[in-house]
Image: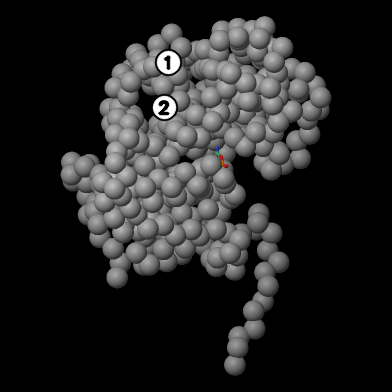
């Protein structure tokens, strides 16, 4: 006889937190990328050099690198750029990919992240690429599966592969090669403008770019850019006046207002556009030579006008193109980490559940 299922009326605030001690924790696999803060300048150099090699490699040779290796894309949030470029990158290396999205999987029935990860591992996944609305979810997945996890964006926390492709875009624009040092981008000022508070892209870039000497300016109104942002990394600056920030910038990263994360916060959009929109007049007056970037998706006519997004200073299409090369490098690193990194972490690479 089927058991009756009692639907829970528990509010989220009443749910007992899972005890961390109750989770079987594995060391984080050295092939994982969870935060840009985990990458040294040497790591950046290796990844950028690998991206360059893979981008121009003969496709028939390249697709033997990870032939038939199994990669799962686990996407709890929608994505166009990140999901497609990770998938294209994995396939270009010869790997088999499987996509699990929240809307069409047992996640809809309430399956937890931990159980979904263990299930994918049992099905042979050797690496999981995770996008989640929850900050920190990739750490849980890494510790419960022991697999290399690539963070494809977690809540308001980080989007490290986006920051890496942004870095490659800036380096290419400056005609600087992949052999980076702490001083490669000394003298370069990058302004990140918009909804900094909710942006994982802003956080990953703010943690990454100063490692190579970049001066980072954050710009936006107080509700979207609290003063506490200066504590993110030493040396970071806040400039509320966009025109003044533009006048000092070599690169400008525009961000969309993340309506899905505003949680009741209301903004006067007309006033926002007046003060913070990247439009032709403003860019021509204050930053006529700056590189204009945007991680996407763009809300045309709000944070950036079509004339600027499609104009000669825009690097938006280059950012998207760079995503495939960077993500090939990340996937290859995930599945072929160095011997010394494995010895250090005690991880046995290539071990699958059967
Ligand atoms: N930049 C970015 O993460 O875009 P998607 O949400 O389309 O992946």
Where does the image place residue 317, in percent across and percent down from the top left?
A: 54, 31
Beta carbon of the mark 2 residue lies under 8 A of ligand 1: no
Residue designated by label 2 = 168
SS for dot 2: helix
Residue designated by label 1 = 174
The Cα atoms of the two marked residues, 2 and 1, are separated by 10 Å
**Relative side of 315 to 23, left or right:** right
**Front position in the image: 338 or 28:** 338
Q: Quadrant of ligand 1?
A: top right
User: Residue placed at 59% from the left, 49% from the top?
Assistant: 78
**Relative side of 348 to 10, left or right:** left
**Front position in the image: 148 or 23:** 148
Picture layout, residue 139 above or below residue 273: below
Picture layout, residue 334 above or below residue 37: below
* Circle 1 crowding by C-alpha within 10 Å: few under 14, some 14–19, many from 20: few
User: Residue placed at 47% from the left, 63% from the top?
Assistant: 116
Quarter where residue 275 is shown: top right
Q: Which mark is residue 204?
A: none
User: Residue placed at 62% from the left, 21% from the top?
Assistant: 311
Where does the image place residue 135, in percent across and percent down from the top left?
A: 53, 44
In this view of the protein, can residue 339 be seen by the observer? Answer: yes
**Front position in the image: 154 or 125:** 125
Where does the image place residue 44, in percent across and percent down from the top left?
A: 33, 29
**Front position in the image: 28 or 280:** 280
């Amino acid at each position: 006889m089927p058991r009756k299922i009692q639907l829970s009326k528990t509010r989220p605030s009443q749910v007992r937190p899972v005890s961390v001690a109750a989770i079987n924790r594995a060391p984080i696999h050295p092939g994982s990328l969870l935060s840009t803060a985990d990458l040294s300048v040497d790591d950046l150099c290796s990844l950028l050099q690998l991206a360059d090699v893979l981008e121009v490699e003969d496709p028939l040779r390249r697709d033997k690198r990870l032939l038939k290796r199994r990669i799962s894309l686990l996407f709890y949030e929608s994505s166009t750029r990140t999901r497609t470029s990770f998938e294209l990158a994995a396939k270009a290396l010869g790997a088999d990919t499987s996509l699990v999205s929240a809307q069409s999987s047992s996640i809809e029935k309430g399956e937890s992240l931990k159980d979904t990860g263990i299930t994918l591992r049992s099905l042979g996944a050797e690496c999981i690429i995770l996008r989640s609305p929850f900050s920190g979810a990739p750490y849980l997945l890494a510790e419960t599966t022991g697999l290399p996890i690539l963070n494809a964006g977690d809540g308001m926390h980080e989007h490290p592969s986006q920051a890496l492709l942004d870095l490659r875009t800036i380096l290419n624009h400056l005609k600087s090669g992949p052999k980076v040092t702490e001083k490669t981008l000394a003298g370069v000022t990058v302004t990140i403008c918009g909804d900094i508070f909710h942006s994982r892209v802003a956080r990953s870039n703010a943690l990454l770019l100063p490692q190579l000497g970049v001066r980072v300016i954050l710009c936006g109104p107080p509700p979207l850019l609290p003063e506490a942002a200066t504590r993110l990394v030493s040396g970071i600056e806040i400039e509320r006046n966009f025109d003044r920030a533009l006048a000092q910038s070599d690169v400008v990263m525009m961000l969309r207002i993340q309506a899905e994360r505003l949680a009741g916060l209301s903004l006067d959009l007309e006033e926002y556009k007046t003060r913070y929109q990247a439009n032709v007049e403003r860019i021509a007056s204050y930053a006529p030579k700056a590189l204009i970037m945007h991680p996407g998706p763009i809300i045309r006519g709000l944070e950036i006008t079509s004339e600027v997004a499609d104009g000669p200073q825009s690097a938006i299409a280059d950012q998207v193109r760079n995503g495939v090369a960077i993500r090939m490098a990340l996937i290859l690193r995930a599945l072929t980490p160095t011997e010394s990194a494995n010895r250090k972490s005690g991880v046995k690479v290539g071990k699958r559940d059967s």
